[in-house]
Image (cartoon, rainbow, N blue to C red):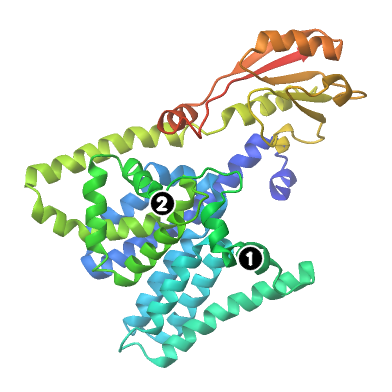
């Protein structure tokens, strides 16, 4: 943000676009690592397919720039897999590759602590790997992992004066697995098989059934990645708090396993059926890719604030959350930030806005006209309709897939006089 403002960019929407582009550039090495892992074992043709899945599967581009924590850990996670493979291949100073793999795995864990199941399985498998892997390679791997943990502890001490601060706050709940399995703490809770259904839906049914079967077979080709991915999947399935985005870190690894299992799948399907599956998959994926890439989610929360900012006359904004409750992303109001008041149904609007120069009102309501009259009376001002923000295509698609947890809301903007 400091850099963009330094070159004269102050619009929060443009600033965020720059941030998204930086995130997109950061995510590109994930495609490289998927390609290299598959190229080594299966050749360039399979590597091209795996790289294409990692780059163009409809969920990957948009989540790479929107789901920060779940997406940024993907690159070091795949780097750990590839660099450890270099160590096993005895490629020029394998101990160095082992240390790099350990450091990358530790970095992924620091970025996303719920990767613990994957990390523990990966470390255990590395330690029992037979020759040509040597004890020195394994110690180098542990050294790289330990170095990252020590550096994180040091940063905790500098910032919070407590060496184990982030570990306690992020890993502490994992010491109480029974609580995590039973209490979602207000987040969506689903049965253990929820993530299986999520993958079946995400990987474009009915092709998804065949692709997941191929992934199971592909685990034999990549046992280290396959077992670690399974450990991740099982540990997340046992936790009460289940959200679709939690699966993002293992999607590129899952693509590797799918591609590795495709020879088995092709041998069990008629050639025409196999080709038809891919025609169907890529056709549907292309349509979804266009929809979700060029249509952001939660439009009703962001777009109203950008509209208010770009009018450059806001002195105070009232957000009436009458059919949903959320933290207002006030960053999009820009700088200098106008006064902001948030009320829910039943709260006293007059006292909540007393002394504030409110000249914009954003209403989230199933009865906006009735609430406009009520708010006008409480503010002792006339409310003039400015515009209405409709749900984006992504919001509507998410609502169609899971209407219980994904709601598609509208926002109505008024000016006061």
Q: Is residue 206 left or right of residue 233?
A: left
Residue at image position (81%, 7%) is: 382
| Res. 417 visible in picture | no
Q: Position of residue 96 (x, y in %)?
A: 46, 84
Of 220 and 239, nearer the camera is 239
| Res. 345 visible in picture | yes
Q: Badge 1, how many Cα within 10 Å: few under 14, some, many 20+?
A: few
Q: Position of residue 210 (x, y in %)?
A: 21, 48
Q: Position of residue 195 (x, y in %)?
A: 39, 49
Q: Quadrant of residue 202?
A: top left
Of 236 and 54, nearer the camera is 236
Q: CA distance from mark 1 to mark 2?
A: 22 Å
Residue at image position (54%, 72%) is: 106
Q: Quadrant of residue 302?
A: top right
Please, is residue 148 above or below residue 49 in the view?
Answer: below
Residue at image position (65%, 72%) is: 152
Q: Quadrant of residue 222?
A: bottom left
Residue located farthest toward the bottom when viewing the structure as drawn? 135
Tell me the residue that label 1 is attached to: 172
Circle 1 — which element?
helix
Q: Is residue 47 left or right of residue 160?
A: left
Of 4 and 411, nearer the camera is 411
Q: Position of residue 223 (x, y in %)?
A: 29, 71
Q: Earlier in the sequence, mark 1 or mark 2?
A: 1
Residue at image position (71%, 21%) is: 362
Circle 2 — which element?
loop
Please, is residue 39 above or below residue 3 in the view?
Answer: below
The C terminus: image quadrant = top right
Tell me the residue that label 2 is attached to: 192
Q: Is residue 341 left or right of residue 213?
A: right
């Amino acid at each position: 943000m400091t850099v963009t403002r330094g070159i004269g960019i102050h619009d929060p929407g443009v600033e965020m676009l720059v941030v998204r582009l930086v995130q997109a550039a950061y995510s590109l090495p994930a495609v490289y690592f998927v390609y290299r892992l598959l190229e080594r074992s299966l050749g360039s043709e399979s590597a091209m397919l795996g790289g294409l899945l990692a780059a163009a599967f409809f969920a990957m581009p948009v989540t790479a720039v929107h789901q920060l924590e779940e997406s940024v850990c993907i690159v070091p996670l795949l780097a750990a897999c590839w660099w450890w493979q270099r160590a096993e291949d005895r490629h020029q100073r394998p101990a160095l590759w082992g240390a790099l793999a350990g450091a990358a795995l530790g970095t992924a864990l620091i970025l996303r602590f719920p990767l613990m199941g994957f990390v523990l399985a990966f470390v255990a498998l590395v330690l029992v790997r037979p020759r040509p892997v040597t004890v020195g390679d394994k110690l180098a791997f542990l050294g790289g992992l330990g170095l990252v943990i020590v550096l994180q502890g040091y940063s905790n001490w500098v910032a919070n004066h407590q060496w184990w601060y982030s570990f306690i706050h992020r890993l502490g709940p994992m010491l109480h697995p029974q609580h995590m399995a039973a209490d979602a703490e207000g987040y969506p809770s689903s049965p253990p098989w929820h993530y299986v259904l999520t993958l079946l839906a995400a990987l474009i049914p009915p092709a998804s059934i065949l692709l997941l079967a191929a992934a199971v077979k592909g685990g034999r080709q990549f046992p280290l990645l396959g077992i670690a991915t399974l450990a991740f999947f099982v540990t997340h399935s046992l936790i009460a708090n289940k959200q679709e985005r939690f699966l993002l870190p293992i999607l590129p690894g899952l693509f590797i396993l799918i591609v590795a299992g495709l020879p088995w799948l092709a041998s069990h399907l008629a050639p025409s059926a196999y080709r038809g599956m891919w025609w169907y998959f890529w056709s549907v994926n292309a349509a979804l890719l266009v929809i979700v890439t060029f249509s952001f989610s939660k439009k009703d929360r962001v777009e109203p604030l950008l509209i208010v900012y770009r009018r450059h006359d806001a002195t105070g904004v009232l957000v009436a959350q009458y059919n949903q409750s959320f933290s207002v992303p006030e960053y999009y109001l820009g700088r200098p930030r106008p006064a902001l008041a948030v009320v829910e149904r039943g709260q006293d609007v007059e006292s909540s806005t007393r002394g504030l120069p409110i000249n914009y009102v954003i209403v989230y309501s199933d009865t906006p006209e009735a609430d406009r009259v009520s708010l006008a009376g409480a503010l002792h001002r006339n409310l003039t309709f400015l515009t209405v923000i409709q749900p984006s295509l992504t919001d509507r698609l998410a609502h169609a897939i899971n209407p219980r947890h994904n709601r598609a809301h509208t926002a109505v903007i008024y000016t006061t006089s």
